[in-house]
Amino acid sequence: MSFVSVRIGSGLSKGPDPRVATIEAGTDARQALDGRRADLVLVFCAGAHLAAPEATLEGVREALDPRALIGCGAGGVLARGREVERGTAVAVWAASFDADPSHAVTAFHATASAAPGATEIEGLPDVRGASAVILIPDPYSFPADRGLEQIADQAAGVPVLGGISSARTLDGGAALFCGDAVAADGAVGVILREIDVLPCVSQGAAPIGPPLTVTAAEGHVIREIDGRPALAALRDAIELLEPGERDSVGGGLLLGIAIGDERHDDRPGRPDDRDRFLVRGIIGADPDAGTVAVGAAVLPGRVVRLHMRDAGSADRDLRTGLELRRAALGGKAAGALVFTCNGRGRAMFDAGDHDADAVDQALGGAATAGFMAAGEIGPVGGENFLHGFTATVAVFGA
């Protein structure tokens, strides 16, 4: 697939007036577009701006007059190496593509409704042939997992990146932006075509101990590992860990489940073994039966591995993944969209700006923006999942 060239700019403002602050951030973002009109804008607002989301849209239109726009309200926003985890702020991300915008960018607002025996998703365009999808669901009115299933049914392998919106308007509705409207429910997103987007999913966890094989499982319950009761096999694996690693699992066991194609792909910036493990918590155990329950369905024959989560491993995981993507793009990225968990930030790293600064450094100062999400969306092993305590990054080639 051939890709078009991309120009991206971003801006951040902590001003109290939603319209004025958005104009300020949007004007900063516009500087990188070299006088071109913005084909796509994403806007994320927090704090007092949620009292007047329509004013945020007015500011975007005045500063950028975008052809397509999506965004959401959030508990915190980020841009240009800075994070505003609390308080009032707006982040604006703008892109111009050397392509027919009506083909390259399709913004949408999807809704979900209950149907007998199922949930129906309406408003999701055809994603076949897309290079990537950005998806921002409301947590209360849109089942993100069902949306991802529908996308996979249409076009397996198309990467979906995004985050669950993490704030609502004063009247309790979803603060979702699509075009000139504020949507009170559902999900907003954009389908990208002929645009080079490399997904980077940093689950903030590092593998420890040896790979193990599930030999009996049903749904979320693992019965046997390497032919032995699963609980006993995991206990033995923990006993063999180094003391520091053993201490790290005291706060809660994590298990990585190998996903996708087992063949190794050694092209620069492409998935490695670390990228193949879907990290989930061990949520229960039955000592009498010797079984363990994990936060994802597991099939017999899957390779699993214990994982540890701490600030150090989360930092290394994110930086390594981003460096691989930048190398795949010939050392230069046009920009990135960042969706980081609202449980990371100072709570994980004991310092502000960590993820925003790491992306800024790894991508050489390329324009970035995003928000602190209530759940992050991104691919592992070629399949799209909803994550927690994760930073998912859509890295755009220039």
Image (cartoon, rainbow, N blue to C red):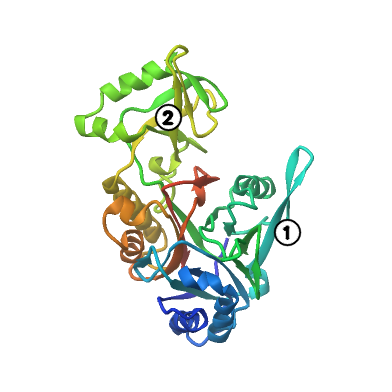
Which one is in front, 182 or 376?
182
Q: Residue at x 60, y 75 (%)?
A: 99
| Residue type for callout 1 | Gly
Proximity of marks 2 and 1: CB atoms separated by less than 8 Å:
no
Which one is in front, 196 or 258?
258
Which one is in front, 156 or 340?
340
In the current view of this chain or complex, which residue is farthest to the front? 171
**Residue 105: % across, % down:** 63, 69
How packed mark 1 is, by other alpha carbons closer than 10 Å (few <14, some 14-19, many 20 or more), is few
Q: Nearer the viewer, mark 2 or mark 1?
A: 1
Q: Residue at x 66, y 57 (%)?
A: 186
Q: Residue at x 57, y 66 (%)?
A: 170
User: Which quarter of the rendering shows the N terminus?
Assistant: bottom right
The residue to which callout 1 is attached is 123
Q: Secondary structure at mark 1?
A: loop
The residue to which callout 2 is attached is 304
| Residue type for callout 2 | Val
